[in-house]
Amino acid sequence: MEESERMIQVRNDGRKFDQIRKVKITRNFTKYAEGSILIEIGDTKVLCTASVEEKVPPFLKNSGTGWITSEYSMLPRATGHRKIRESSRGKVEGRTQEIQRLIGRCLRSVVDLSKLGERTVWVDCDVLQADGGTRTASITGAYVALADAFYKLYAEGVIQEMPLKSFIAAVSVGIVGENEVLDLCYEEDSAAQVDMNIIMTDKGEFVELQGTAETHPFEKQQLFEMISLGEKGVRELINIQKEILGEEITNIIMRKKMEVVVATQNKGKLAEFSRILEDFNFQLISMSEAGLANLEIEETGSSFEENALIKAREVARLTGKIAIADDSGLMVDFLGGQPGVFSARFAGEDVTDEDNNKKLLELMSEAEEEDRSAKFVSVIAVVYPGGEEFTVKGTCKGKILRSPQGEGGFGYDPLFIASGQSQTFAQIKPELKNKISHRAKALDNMKKEFRKRLG
């Protein structure tokens, strides 16, 4: 289904196809557990508690490593008809076993058990009311309860570090009728041709995908559509988790720096990007450090945005990490925006800066002073491994001289005077250039965009 169609059509409960239900998480819901929350997603309500026990299973004794385990159950009248308690039957149903193992598996995937010490955290998820998505709600809520329990241990000095490596959340997707939909309620789940549960981390990593064709097989493109919807839903749920846990706990959890690949081999550029993003939880690495030393990416775009995205998308695809790439150049009004994306090879392939400058001056030989306006443009693209991406732009307006001035800089710097300046980019001090240049402005805009997205 086209995105425009998805946005205008609604479901029985009034939601758009790509919209999750209303989410509410109440912390410290019970008195005794180290971590406890009530999570409400639509009409589904799950009580999640995290209880710390100062011992581990026999197979972990004397290992210095802890353990996370989970139990899951539903109240007898959590659904439309009362269900006999499993304790009365004397055995745990297969569905219950499967779900509680799933919850434990997912939580362990984002915990450094070696930092927990020899203790077990029991995570209990009890469904008070079910209206679809009980297992996904349990995982999303259990993470918050677990984070609270860990923080209590951390604040009391029982453990030295928060053992959490990342955030994790889960959401359901499916095909109902002809539509791929996000976060199915019970009515939709019962009628779905396909239903799937997607569990992911805040780093865009998949922890588990559970998908079933209930009535007929589905195509690969439909799978991609559902995964895309799931990624969107998980991002929104993780943002809610962060908001509920608050800035302090969230910052502690995110202390582990995320590796971000800058599409460059230039140490100076890497240092510049690292300096701009030093306030974030990032460790910037070059393409060489990411194992891509010999990678050559053909820039076939017709704009700076396209070329930057081409590079960033390829690096993100190959590394599975956040990728940053940039493209920049000079745009001269008298030449209709040339040299633009061809700035580095304006005079041809394998040419020098002097060759490019010479051609530019030749083409502008008839231009009057009022027609010599130009601007440097820098575009930075950031692409996440999950497919999310954004671009930012920085520009520096000025004019083109009739002859080169200055020995510093590179490219067209000897010919360009920024507005408000009396010297070319090749003449002004590097400190000033780094404040007013197109690249400096693009970097500042990138920092602002990261700040907005990371809260």
Image: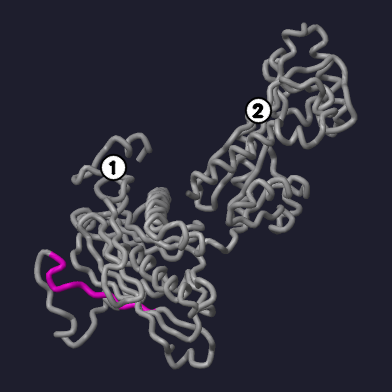
Q: Is residue 386 left or right of residue 272?
A: left
In the rendered structure, which amino acid carries the disc numbered 1? Lys
| Magenta span of residues | 69-79
Query: In the image, residue 435 lies at what x, y percent?
Result: 71, 34
Q: In this picture, is 38 found above or below 57?
A: above
Crowd around label 2: few <14 · some 14–19 · many ≥20 (10 Å) = many
In which quadrant of the rendered view does residue 433 lie? top right
Residue indicated by mark 1: 16
Q: Residue furthest toward the left?
A: 81
SS of the residue under disc 1: loop
Asked whether residue 220 is in view, the answer is no
Residue 76 among magenta residues: yes
**Quick check: marks 1 and 2 in contact, CB under 8 Å?**
no
Residue at the image position 76 percent from the left and 52 percent from the top? 294
Q: Residue furthest toward the front?
A: 156
Quick one: 64 or 306, which is closer to the camera? 64
Query: In the image, residue 33 lies at what x, y percent?
Result: 32, 76
Residue at the image position 78 percent from the left and 22 percent from the top? 416
Q: Is residue 393 left or right of residue 74?
A: right
Q: In this picture, is 271 found above or below 109?
A: above
SS of the residue under disc 2: strand
In the rendered structure, which amino acid carries the disc numbered 2? Thr
Residue indicated by mark 2: 395
The image shows a total of numbered marks equal to 2
Q: Is residue 221 left or right of residue 304?
A: left
